[in-house]
Amino acid sequence: MTTLKTVKSAATPAASSDKPAEEAVETVTRIGADAAGKSVDKAVALSKGHVETADKVGSEVFKGYEEIVQFNKDNLDALVSSAGIVARGVQDLSKTVVALAQESLEESVAVGKALVGAKTLKEVIDLSSSLAKSNFEKLVSESAKLSQLSSKLAEEAIAPINSRVDAAVQKLSKTAA
């Protein structure tokens, strides 16, 4: 039994020496848990910051996308408007040309009838000369009229496109600044 006592007495000091080890383990565990908690808090804060930044950037990108869509819609509207102006202008020019052709044809028929009814060569030459002079004067005056209508049409048709070009230049100027 003496051996038992010896063992017991040896075990008792070991048990009392385990207490500081347990305290050390608890201290290390507590410090580790505190450090892990702080790291988790930092990671959450960092993630939250990244999410807020991504949300802000996403909002700005979406806003930019909406601006691009609106800008392109306005460009398309200007193009459609310009095409409509050209179509109406060409229609007006065509009506003017047809009216001129009809008027010229009617005048030529009248002169043709007069030529058929002419009794002398002098009358034929006078009528032909008169028709040539009249046709030349009409050609000059109607060409000026058609030129003026064409210029007006070109100015009106390009106006919506010019306004979009101006808007694009302003937008690029703001972006560059």
Image (cartoon, grey):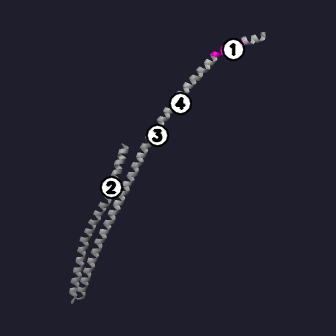
Kindly indicate the quadrant of the structure image that contains residue 13: top right
Q: Distance between the residues labelled 3 and 4?
A: 21 Å
- Given residues 50 and 111, the one toward you in this image is 50
| Residue type highlighted by circle 3 | Ala
Q: Are circles 3 and 2 on residues that touch, CB within 8 Å?
A: no
Q: Are circles 4 and 1 on residues that touch, CB within 8 Å?
A: no
Q: Distance between the residues labelled 1 and 2?
A: 96 Å
User: Which residues fall within the magenta stretch?
Assistant: 10-19
Secondary element under disc 2, as helix, strand or loop, is helix
The circle on residue 162 is 2
| Residue type highlighted by circle 4 | Val
Query: Could you tell me which residue is drawn at 36 percent across and 50 percent down?
Result: 168
**Mark 1 — residue?**
14
Query: Could you tell me which residue is drawn at 34 percent across and 60 percent down?
Result: 81
| Residue type highlighted by circle 2 | Asn
Q: How far apart are marks 3 and 2 (CA)?
A: 38 Å
**Mark 3 — residue?**
54
Secondary element under disc 1, as helix, strand or loop, is helix
Secondary element under disc 4, as helix, strand or loop, is helix
| Residue type highlighted by circle 1 | Ala
6 to the left or right of 114: right
**Mark 4 — residue?**
40
